[in-house]
Image: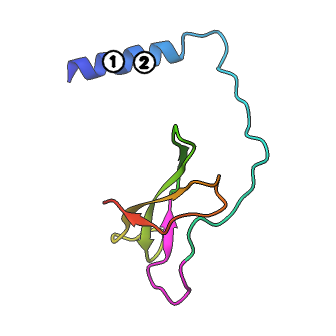
């Protein structure tokens, strides 16, 4: 545990050691769209907290707490959706947890 705390302290020190914050370059040509939409008749169609990442091969991956009835729902499952065409199309949600 002591080693983990030391690594965290070192990481924090390195992050704040610079005189100026790192440069931020906003994404260009960003569009918004739907990753997954289930029929309105589906009771567990709510997906929450969807971070997105790009893998080394260019695949976009969205992870979310899905198949929920509402924002606060104890039955959510961790799901991922992938896109190999820069977000134009997505896989159906795959339950990973």
Magenta: main secondary structure: loop
Comparing 57 with 40, the one in front is 57
Image coloring type? rainbow
Write down the region rendered in magenta: 38-48
Q: Which residue is mark 2?
A: 11
Q: State the residue at coordinates (54%, 15%).
A: 16
Give coordinates of residue 73: x percent, y percent: 39, 71
Give coordinates of residue 58: x percent, y percent: 57, 43
Q: Which residue is mark 1?
A: 7
Alpha-carbon span between mark 2 and mark 1? 6 Å
Give coordinates of residue 75: x percent, y percent: 33, 72
Q: Is residue 9 above or below residue 89?
A: above
Residue 15, which numbered label? none
* Category of crowding for the residue at label 2, using alpha-carbon neighbours closer than 10 angstroms: few (below 14), some (14–19), many (at least 20): few
SS at mark 1?
helix
Q: State the residue at coordinates (37%, 68%).
A: 76
Would you say residue 87 sits in the magenta stretch? Answer: no
Q: Are marks 2 and 1 in contact (CB under 8 Å)?
A: yes
Q: Is residue 29 above or below residue 71?
A: above
SS at mark 2?
helix
Q: Quick check: 30 left or right of 13? A: right
């Amino acid at each position: 545990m002591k080693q983990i705390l030391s690594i965290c302290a070192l990481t924090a020190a390195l992050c704040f050691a610079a005189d100026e914050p790192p440069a931020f370059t906003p994404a260009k040509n960003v569009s918004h769209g739907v990753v997954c939409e289930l029929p309105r008749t589906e009771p567990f169609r709510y997906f929450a907290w969807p971070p997105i990442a790009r893998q080394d091969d260019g695949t976009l991956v969205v992870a979310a707490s899905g198949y929920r009835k509402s924002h606060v729902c104890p039955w959510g499952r961790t799901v991922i959706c992938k896109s190999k065409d820069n977000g134009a199309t997505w896989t159906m949600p795959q339950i990973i947890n």
